[in-house]
Image (cartoon, rainbow, N blue to C red):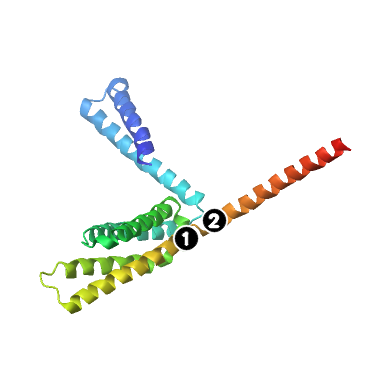
Amino acid sequence: MFFIRTLIAVPLSVTVWLLNYFAFDMNFWMSGLNGTLAGVLAYWITGAVMRHRFIKSHGLKRKEYLYIKKNLDEAKGKLNRLQRSLMSIRHLPSTRQRRDFIKVAKRIYKLTKKEPRRFYQAEQFYYSHLDSAVELAEKYVFLSSQPRKTKELEISLNETRKTLHELTVNVEKDLHDVLANDIDQLHFEMDVAKHSIKKIKDSRINDESRRLK
């Protein structure tokens, strides 16, 4: 969107500046000001049109889109905090699990950003699981940074790692929910393709039988 808006705004800005300066005999600074204003206006209008088309193409109302966008903006900050916290945990056995957690969480975010309507299939992730993961990860980092670790603290850290593992499983289910419609559609298309292949095979067998007779 930024590239397209810039591609329209910059040439228009230059064109307006040249027309003002050479065709209408305006001074250099006034021509430059008019060109800049034209570019800014074109950039804003192009963005508004593209945003409207994007919202309409996904079957959303503007109010719905703004609500989803607000949640996505908040989620982006939470994901950054989560990644910083999880990657600063010094526990080698859980490294892969933590990386998988971040990978799946980011995948849900990217899918939702690309297709905002998927937000409704990922509400559990945005309203519950992501917040819990951020809170647990940050508390774990804080507690693990303490110079002296008591037995009680070690138990708490171990329980936190187990809970984060359980959250990883839940987030993977969240991703499955987001992709549920795509999976159903794939199964439907596979069934149609198999039925079509079977019809072709049966037709060829029947043709071969007729020729042999």
Q: Quadrant of residue 2?
A: top left
Q: Quadrant of residue 35?
A: top left
Q: 201 or 1, which lies in front?
A: 201
Tell me which residue sits at (18%, 78%) in the image. 151
Q: Is residue 153 visible to the viewer in this orientation of the structure?
A: yes
Residue annotated with mark 2: 183
Q: Residues within 10 Å of mark 2 (few under 14, many from 20)?
A: few
Q: 144 or 133, which lies in front?
A: 144
Residue 111 as seen in the image, left or right of residue 213: left
Outermost bottom residue? 152
Q: Secondary structure at mark 2?
A: helix
Outermost front residue? 212
Residue annotated with mark 1: 176
Tell me which residue sits at (77%, 45%) in the image. 202
Tell me which residue sits at (52%, 59%) in the image. 180
Residue 45 as seen in the image, left or right of residue 154: right
Question: Along the polypeptide, which appears first: circle 2 or circle 1?
Answer: 1
Q: 21 or 102, which lies in front?
A: 102
Distance Cα–Cα, label 2 vs label 1: 9 Å
Outermost left residue? 147
Q: Residues within 10 Å of mark 1 (few under 14, many from 20)?
A: some
Q: Quadrant of residue 26?
A: top left
Q: Secondary structure at mark 1?
A: helix
Q: Are marks 2 and 1 in contact (CB under 8 Å)?
A: yes
Query: Compared to 42, does 143 lie above or below?
Result: below
Residue 93 as seen in the image, left or right of residue 143: right
Q: Quadrant of the C terminus?
A: top right
Question: Where's residue 59, x and y in %?
Answer: 52, 54
Outermost right residue? 213
What amino acid is at disc 2?
Ile
